[in-house]
Image: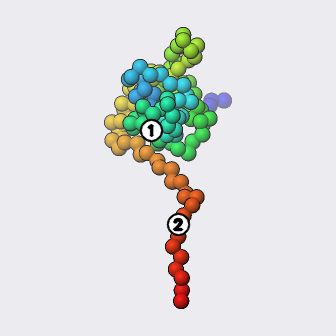
Amino acid sequence: MNRNKKTFVPSTTHYKILETIEELNKNNDYPLPQGVGKILKGIVDEETSKYQNIRTFQTIISYSSKKICRYVLVLLRHGYIEKIYDKKTNELYLKISPFGVSALQEYRKKHKKSFVKKKQLAKPTIVHIKTIVSK
């Protein structure tokens, strides 16, 4: 039996991940998948505070870290990103591959709009309401 081989077509989320990794790699910063998730979800801490100006910061607030890691794994399997070893921490960090850079450039040519930052709307827990006293 012949199976239909499906070609991988990256989604907007895949391109957001590629964009994030590329921006970090420009400054010689290499993230773990969890670090990419922090930036995309908009979590501000001592590691991510200097990356708040990245275009993809806080653009995927509803995804779990596990789901973002799955997207990263798919990009690894298809050659869009690769891993780089750090001797100090004994960890493998993410680096965008030349194939990933060219795919991201093609995406940018077709999609001129920038990524939209999401805002988490928090419900106020205490509200002051003026009551009207009727006579």
Secondary element under disc 2, as helix, strand or loop, is loop
Front residue of 12/110: it is 12
Tell me the colour scheme of the image: rainbow
Give the residue drawn at x 56%, y 30%. 34
Q: Earlier in the sequence, mark 2 or mark 1?
A: 1
Number of other residues with Cα within 10 Å of mark 1, as a class: few under 14, some 14 to 19, many 20 or more: many
Q: Nearer the viewer, mark 2 or mark 1?
A: 2
Count residues near mark 2 (Cα–Cα under 10 Å), then give few for <14, some for 14-19, many for 20+. Answer: few
In the picture, the disc for residue 128 is 2
Q: Amino acid at mark 2?
A: His
Please name the residue shown 49% across and 40% down the image. 42
Kindly tell me whether residue 10 is visible in this rendering.
no
- Residue 77 place in picture, x, y as percent: 56, 24
Q: Residue furthest right?
A: 1
Locate the N terminus by quadrant: top right
- The amino acid pointed to by label 1 is Phe
Residue 114 spot, x, y in % from top left: 37, 42
CA gap, disc 2 to disc 1? 33 Å
Can residue 76 be seen from the camera position used here? yes
List the residue tagged with mark 1: 57
Q: Can you say whether 61 is above or below 66 in the image?
A: below
Vertical placement of residue 128 versus 1, above or below: below
Residue at the spot 40% in from the left edge and 42% down from the top edge = 115
Rendering coords of residue 17 (x, y %): 48, 33
Residue 81 picture location, percent across and down: 49, 23
Q: Residue at x 51, y 73 (%)?
A: 130
